Amino acid sequence: FCNRLRHVESMSLQPSGAGRISHLNAVILGEPLESEENDLVFPSQEFSSQALVSSPEQYRNMYEKSIEDPAGFWSEIASQFYWKEKWNPEVYTENIDVRKGTVKFEWFKGGRTNISYNALDRNIEAGNGGKVAIYWEGNDLGDDGRLTYAELLEKVCQLANYLKHVGVRKGDAVIIYLPMLTELPIAMLACARIGAVHSVVFAGFSSESLSQRIIDCKPKAVITCNAVRRGSKPIHLKEIVDSALRESVKNGVTVDLCLTFENKSAMRREDTKWQDGRDVWWQDVVPLFPTKCDVEWVDAEDPLFLLYTSGSTGKPKGVLHTTGGYMVYTATTFKYAFDYKPSDVYWCTADCGWITGHSYVTYGPLLNSATIVVFEGFILLIQCEQFIQAPNYPDAGRCWNIVDKYKVTIFYTAPTLVRSLMREGDAYVTRYQRKSLRVLGSVGEPINPSAWRWFYNVVGDSRCPISDTWWQTETGGFMITPLPGAWPQKPGSATFPFFGVQPVIVDEKGNEIEGECSGYLCIKNSWPGAFRTLYGDHERYETTYFKPFAGYYFTGDGCSRDKDGYIWLTGRVDDVINVSGHRIGTAEVESALVSHPQCAEAAVVGVDHEIKGQGIYAFVTLVEGVPYSEELRKSLISVVRNQIGAFAAPDKIHWAPGLPKTRSGKIMRRILRKIASRQLNELGDTSTLADPSVVEQLISLGDC
Ligand code: WTA
């Protein structure tokens, strides 16, 4: 890898247009090879000269050190944080090779620290108490607020004290089901302060999904709010929680406390359904508690949070992150990938219900004592019709209005948002100044070069580098990402690995392949931010991630590397689809569909979607004798909404009297994918099917 980088380095930084490489051979997403997307895009001299990492050479030195001496590299960085006690002499231990025994990563074991202390008290002691920690922007224009670091600490302490008072202890789980109010990061930091393990459930998940998570992690408390307003319509979050808690009780899990924030702009408390004894208003209790709260010092390897994510089976996986390594890794990746400066105002549009909101709304930025913007909108759910399109409210210029209002310097979002705003036209962007912007970021799915160009040229006025950060819930933080001042970018490529990360591309047999190639993306070593297990199921952890290619962590993504060594992600290679940057397991959608009494079988595949990246396409076989109708189509979609959440609703239901199966009964998804994307000339060999005639039948029913 370092050799390949030398090549890039030799192309010293030049103004845009120069140093052009033609005929790149690894262009993803079907873009034509000869197109202008193949250009290199250089950071300006001015940007690079002030950047934390300002040249390929500087990166290479740091990267080499991080690979040759991970202990030295990471312990030097970790020392900048506060540790009540230092870690064991060995900075890390790892076994990534399942053939050699249990897979296990440990970083800074024996060290005692607290991430909430490091994100708040440490920054305040360094003189940042009066600095704005959070600018909060509500959906309605003019509805906003701010908290300094000192104020944020006080609020975190009050909630932490309350949680302790009601018996939440170190190691207990707490479920947080809140929209993007400041109470959401406050609740995360309060749990971390007392060593409780938070599990944030995205407030777009249905009550069934929520109860599944409650049953799995058996929380001591659930923290929610009564309602959230989308346009004029309130969504009654508390009622969703009520029904999830009823379902949990039926499964033997009783939660004694439902702490409910009264979100006055959405619903009055008098109108909220209430269960005395279990339900408590946040505003009635939390402000009564002291604004100082001693922290619980925890081991670096004590759990920090659980976050459920989709996999290739129907059951969501509880990804478990621990404290010390995650803290060091999220802070460091944030700092370098966005070239963070203390004067920055940073806005990440993700919701804290997803990993991006954990690592790069809450922990990474606050650990750097950054000023962040939290926007109430469910911004990544823009395509779910039943939500008001938050970033387009009151119009498609809202994002840039917020950028100008808070003088945002770093703007981090998802390609789906870029594509949807691009469709609205440039005028919504150009009517705002956007002068403060310095660095842009992208996450969640591959960004197609035309969206990259629009983001770069129109939003960033051709002067702001884009950090296209590739990572996953499991990785905790960025793995492959540009360092914005260090090297030229190629639109659509996540470029090179972050410090300490050794990505490899393997073939079907698990052999590493070199040079210009395509294959499966794996990681060769542990890194501080890696997840440590799947909650309660270490065996599934090993089977899913470490057995497919023994000796490596398998990411589930395909990728290619071009002749310059740039890495291009090409999307999931497993049964996971990526809809507007959200991971959805096809099996989860299938199991929701077949729970419909009239659905006998379902097979779900992803199809290209102009805005969402991928859309959900479901083939359904009905129970014998049931006719397919528009009404049934709607009720199939609503069953998915109710069981998972609106963001998982299929875009298309395709009635399938029969599904293409092998003689052993296995559904041939390859053929279904081709039918769904109308690539009918590429169906391939259908002769091994038990009944080849189903293919013709499916094609003829395609427009039902
Ligand atoms: C995809 C989100 C291409 C990828 C942080 C990965 C990306 C999955 C990128 C993880 C990117 C994320 N370019 N693909 N910059 N970022 N992905 O766990 O398929 O919600 O495996 O974490 O999103 O999704 P997750």
Image (cartoon, rainbow, N blue to C red):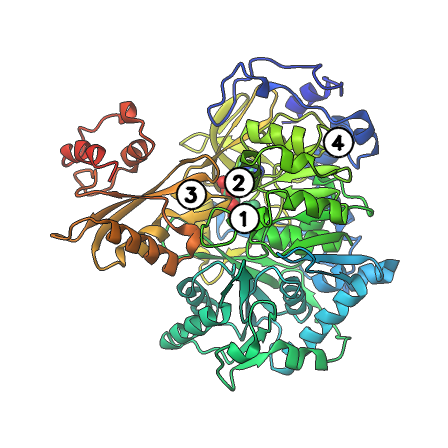
Q: Nearer the viewer, mark 4 or mark 2?
A: 2
Residue indicated by mark 3? 577
Circle 4 SS class: loop
Residue ranking furthest to the bottom:
277
Q: Do residues under tags 1 and 2 come within 8 Å of each other at their CB atoms?
A: yes
Which quadrant of the view contains residue 223? Answer: bottom right
Q: Give how far across and how far down residue 243 sits, in percent.
A: 41, 72
Mark whose residue sits in front, 2 or 3: 2
Q: Relative to the observer, which residue lies in front, 429 or 190?
A: 429
Question: CB atoms at circles 3 and 1 under 8 Å apart?
Answer: no
Labels 3, 1: front one: 1
Residue picked out by circle 4: 485
In this view, 298 is above or below 91: below
| Residue in the image at 47% along x and 46% along y | 383
Q: Secondary structure at mark 3?
A: strand
Q: Looking at the image, is mark 2 or mark 3 earlier in the sequence?
A: 2
Could you say where residue 558 lies in the image, as x and y percent from the top left?
Answer: 47, 34
Image x and y of residue 703, in percent: 25, 36
What residue is rendered at 61% in x and 82% in y?
A: 166
Foreground tag (1 vs 4): 1
Cα gap from disc 4 to disc 2, whole angstroms: 25 Å
